Amino acid sequence: MANKEIPYKIYLNESEMPKYWYNLRADMKNKPAPLLNPGTAKPMTAEELGGVFCEELVQQELDNDTREYPVPQEILDFYKMYRPSPLVRAYCLEKKLNTPAKIYYKFEGNNTSGSHKLNSAIAQAYYAKKQGLKGVTTETGAGQWGTALSMACAYFELDCKVFMVKVSYEQKPFRREVMRVYGADVTPSPSMTTRIGQKILSEHPGTTGSLGCAISEAVEVAVGTPGYRYVLGSVLNQVLLHQSVIGMETKIAMDKYGIRPDVIIGCAGGGSNLGGLIAPFMGEKLRGEADYRIVAVEPASCPSFTRGVYAYDFADTGMVCPLAKMYTLGSDFIPAPNHAGGLRYHGMSPILSQLYNDGLMEAVSVPQTRVFDAAETFARTEGILPAPESSHAICAAIDEAMKCRETGEEKTILFGLTGTGYFDLVAYQKYHDGLMDDYVPTDEELAKFRARLPKV
Ligand SMILES: *Cc1c(COP(=O)(O)O)cnc(C)c1O
């Protein structure tokens, strides 16, 4: 097959599309650590989790053994609207870099929500509908997850209540409006509609909110409203399971043409796109069938892998969620204003954390202005306006390709292009006007937050 002419963009036929999600945990010798009940420090049971999350999603969350999950037909039908996503050879970027490396990217931005998050949003909405629920609640920071969930809920006619961090609600009115097109009820957080919101507003009048606070409000409403559950767009095992569709499509497309990546690169916020992209490749690595270098890229301002610790921590600032063992900077770590909103999370997927701890993958951090340099090089060569989050992966891929130029190696580099940047033009504006800084937290600052980790 390897001598087939390789198209510029590889799309799978309907018959070639993956029919199941791949559960990487089944092949992990060291399983990710279980979520703990913050009150008892005992592993969360299905019953406890079922008060907050949908039943089948709880089962997926706890299942470390089932290798393949058939994708329900209703979800396959929805995927047809925007999948397969293209696997693209970045010829123009290669030419510009004058590198012998071959660069491929898997582009997940070709849907209205503008990112890969729709892959899991539709799955979570499906299971909520199947359970006969009336609706779901969630939080959104920059807005990508809220938009994806709104689309998914509209498709299955579910109510969708989104708590949007107030500063984003005010600064990103267009994202908010897209959510409302899809029928979501969007509330700026903190709000007076929840007890926790009222408390925070009375203690900190004028606060512009945080992701942690929005999570606490969304969970309070889900738990307190009959027929509602809470859903989350990253970090959780179930989300990585759904996102494996990215890696499955990529692997099938590469195998079809005999392409084998040497390095696989992805940006890492909570770890869902990277966990999804690498899943089948990491599976081969875990089973000893092949070897790949796998690289997570994070912002230097929020360096969970490269400067965090592997420990149990709260998943949210409000400390209402279960404890997760992960690479973390501390749940009250507040990253400096950074324009990749989707990467400003203090923790990391427990699955990726375990793999990183076991030396099965690497991580690098990159400063913000270098990320935007890379974004612009990419936009000017490959045509796509990339999301700032995705541009972290572009930056690391360019660095790899430049190393190949020095050594003459013809490496094959694969990276995940998670989304488009049309709603991030204020960030691009700051970059163009020279107003973007490269703040990096000091060791002393990080130590302060680390000292406040829960003692488990
Ligand atoms: C949310 C988001 C990310 C980061 O989330 P992960 O869970 O780490 O994948 C990356 N890129 C885009 C475009 C996003 O919207």
Image: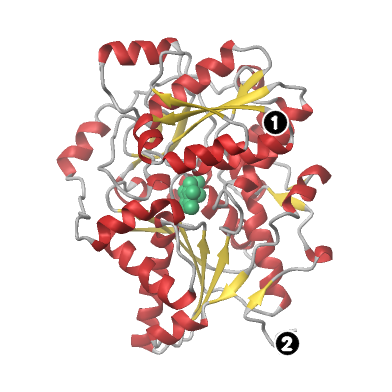
Ligand 1 contact, mark 1 (Cβ < 8 Å): no
Q: Are marks 2 and 1 in contact (CB under 8 Å)?
A: no
Quarter of the image with the N terminus is: bottom right
Quarter of the image with the C terminus is: top left
Q: Name the residue tied to disc 1.
A: 59
The amino acid beneath tag 1 is Gln
Residue plotted at (63% across, 34% down): 61
State whether residue 224 is above or below residue 231.
above
* Foreground pick, 137 / 45: 137
- Residue 4's tag is 2
- Left or right position of 145 against 204: right
State whether residue 427 is above or below residue 61.
below
**Rendered location of residue 121, percent (x, y):** 63, 40
**Rendered location of residue 410, percent (x, y):** 48, 86
State whether residue 220 is above or below residue 279.
above
- Left or right position of 243 against 420: right
Residue 295 picture quarter: bottom left
* Foreground pick, 103 / 31: 103
Neighbour tally class for label 1: few under 14, some 14-19, many 20 plus, Cα within 10 Å: some
**Rendered location of residue 434, percent (x, y):** 19, 60
- Label 2: which secondary element: loop
Q: Does residue 299 appear anywhere in the picture?
A: yes
* Foreground pick, 226 / 325: 226
Q: Tell which circle, 2 or 1, labels the residue nearer the N-terminal end.
A: 2
**Rendered location of residue 238, percent (x, y):** 62, 39
- Label 1: which secondary element: helix
The amino acid beneath tag 2 is Lys
